Amino acid sequence: MKKILITGATGAVGSALAKQLAAGHALALTARQTDKLQTLGHELPSAQVMAADLVQSEAAEALVQEVWQKLEGIDALAHCVGSTLIKPLHLISPAAWQEQFDLNVSTTFHVTRAVVSQALKARTPLSIVLVSSVVAHAGFANHEAVAAAKAAVTALGQSIAATYADKGIRVNIVAPGLTRSSLTQRFIATPEAEARSAALIPTGRIGEPEEVAQLIAFLLSDASRHITGQVIGIDGGQGVLHVPAKPVLKAAS
Ligand SMILES: NC(=O)c1ccc[n+]([C@@H]2O[C@H](COP(=O)([O-])OP(=O)(O)OC[C@H]3O[C@@H](n4cnc5c(N)ncnc54)[C@H](OP(=O)(O)O)[C@@H]3O)[C@@H](O)[C@H]2O)c1
């Protein structure tokens, strides 16, 4: 049984992970909106739920301290907070650029800093999983802000992994491709839209949040104890494969 903090726990990936891990582990689940957290808490009554805006460093520190006390430690952190912005460079406002960095990079910095500090003080091992994106590791048109922010998440995670490798602290980064979620609703809103999106992916379909959650669960577990500093794509091959273009199939109505 591990003591696991899941951030972004009401989101598509975070909630799938919480449901997969709830039976065998002590969980602390967090997000901003209390109504959604309460609903999740009713579904998973053994889990602790607590609201925090992780863009704020003080809120992240207070959350981690509270979780540490309630669970009597933290063995693993899955940071599933993030956002996306699909716009070309010339249409991105400075405020929108900043928001991408706040939600993706600053939340990662604040939460990992707080959790790693506690683990160092307590001299306990820790496994961290961060969520980057396929768009961070290849050039995807109209993804300038989110690609840059997610590349920063990857770089931050790998550097943390290097700094604390000899302290029993592991950090791995998952890089999903298009995954069913409210973030990607516009790409899957209709069967036609989903078929167009799926046609861009070598496996011919978009990803499911449960699949990303399974990968995260493995990386949090001791089964992955010799894996650290890795970026693992879960994207139907989109980030690395070049396959011959296929005609877009008309979705069944
Ligand atoms: N879905 C995809 O296609 C895809 C592709 C590549 C990468 N990703 C990444 O995968 C991760 C999970 O994505 P998802 O699809 O599960 O997203 P999601 O469904 O939108 O979930 C995001 C979660 O983060 C929480 N959150 C947002 N801002 C927050 C803040 N400032 N402080 C604390 N919590 C905050 C949200 O709850 P509240 O709003 O209540 O705070 C929600 O629980 C993200 O890092 C995302 O960028 C997703």
Image: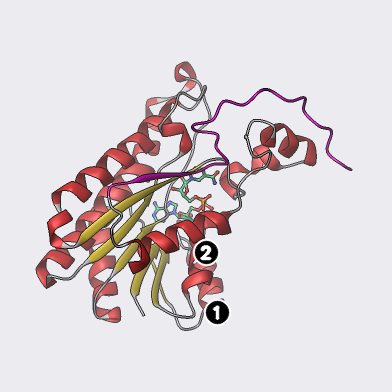
Q: In this view, does 235 lie above or below 48?
A: above
Look at the numbered disc 2 and say if its residue's Cβ is closer than 8 Å to ligand 1: yes
Which quadrant holds the C terminus? top right
Q: Where is residue 108 in the image (x, y as percent from the top left)?
A: 31, 49
* Residue 239 belongs to the span the image colors magenta: yes
Kindly indicate the quadrant of the structure image that contains residue 68: bottom left
Disc 2 and disc 1: Cα gap in Å?
Answer: 13 Å
Which amino acid type corresponds to the residue marked 2 in the rendered image? Ser
Q: Position of residue 183 (x, y in %)?
A: 56, 45
Residue drawn at (52%, 78%) of the image: 44
Indicate the secondary structure of the residue bearing disc 2.
helix
Q: In this view, does 178 lie above or below 247?
A: below
Q: Which of 21 and 234 is in front in this view?
A: 234
Specify the farthest residue to the right: 253
Q: Position of residue 168 (x, y in %)?
A: 18, 63
Circle 2 sits on which residue?
15
Q: Which of 157 and 39 is in front in this view?
A: 157
Left or right of residue 123, residue 194 in this image: right
Residue drawn at (22%, 70%) of the image: 65
Residue 146 at least partly seen: no
Count numbered badges in the picture. 2
Residue drawn at (21%, 60%) of the image: 169
Specify the farthest residue to the bottom: 46
Which amino acid type corresponds to the residue marked 1 in the rendered image? His
Q: Give the range drawn in magenta.
A: 229-253
Left or right of residue 52, residue 168 in this image: left
Circle 1 sits on which residue?
42
Main SS of residues in magenta: loop
Residue drawn at (84%, 33%) of the image: 250
